[in-house]
Amino acid sequence: MRVLVCVSGASGAGLGVKLFEALKTHADEAFLCLSDGAKEVLKREELKFFDDSEIWQGPASGSFGVEVTFVVPCSMNTLAKIACGIGDNLTTRAASVALKERKKLIIAPREMPIHQIHLEQMAKLSGMGVFIAPPMLAYYAQSSTLEDVERFLIGRWMDLAGIKNEMYKKWDNEDE
Ligand SMILES: Cc1cc2nc3c(=O)[nH]c(=O)nc-3n(C[C@H](O)[C@H](O)[C@H](O)COP(=O)(O)O)c2cc1C
């Protein structure tokens, strides 16, 4: 399976990179695309990635064959552009490609609080089959460290993509 992780400039850009790292061992091919905002957050890390401005890269075309596109985290700016069909950078273009090709698109909006326009855009995308999967805390996951929380979130995003993983302990009533 060929997957693409787009990281936009919301808080928690490092989480998107960790999702990408986990996918590298679980998917056939994993690609990473960073927006300028994301790079601001990550500028101290050395990573091999698509620049968001590289609109000519493979994921900008449906024929490249990305099966699953993640936008993790998704800023409200990028959410708005995706919901309006804007494709002005590799992230928004790749999301638009996922929509037109009817492939899986998994978006993790990160803002707090959120206003009505954000909610309307999420509802619009959800109605088109997009997974709206924000980085929510799960108290039942018995996470005691930030790393546990991140592993849980990454595991849930991989679940949505249909990628088997052992990132977190699955819910089991027997544990009660
Ligand atoms: C440190 C930092 C944290 C930010 N966190 C968020 C956030 O959590 N959610 C959000 O929607 N925007 C956040 N922003 C604002 C976005 O980075 C800004 O709207 C930017 O234009 C997004 O561009 P992009 O969508 O192309 O990445 C943050 C900005 C900075 C500098």
Image (spheres, rainbow, N blue to C red):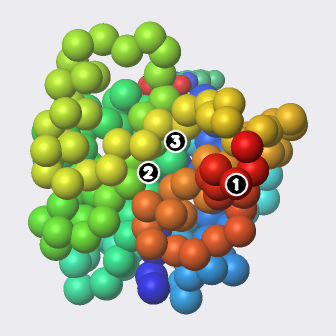
**What crowding class fits label 2: few (fewer than 14 Cα within 10 Å), some (14-19), or many (20 or more)?**
many
Give the mark nearer the N terminus: 2 vs 1.
2
Look at the numbered disc 2 and give the secondary structure of its residue.
strand
Residue on which the image places disc 2? 71
Q: Is residue 124 left or right of residue 40?
A: left
Q: Amino acid at mark 1?
A: Glu
Tell me the distance, in whole angstroms, between the alpha carbons under discs 2 and 3: 6 Å
Rendering quarter of residue 23: bottom right
Q: Is 38 placed above or below 46 here? A: above
Q: Is 48 placed above or below 13 here? A: below
> Which is more toward the observer, 43 or 98?
98
Tell me the distance, in whole angstroms, between the alpha carbons under discs 3 and 1: 33 Å
Residue on which the image places disc 1? 174
Q: Does residue 95 appear in the picture of this structure? A: yes
Residue on which the image places disc 3? 73
Look at the numbered disc 3 and give the secondary structure of its residue.
strand
Q: Kindly identify the residue that appears in the image at 65 percent across and 54 percent down.
A: 172
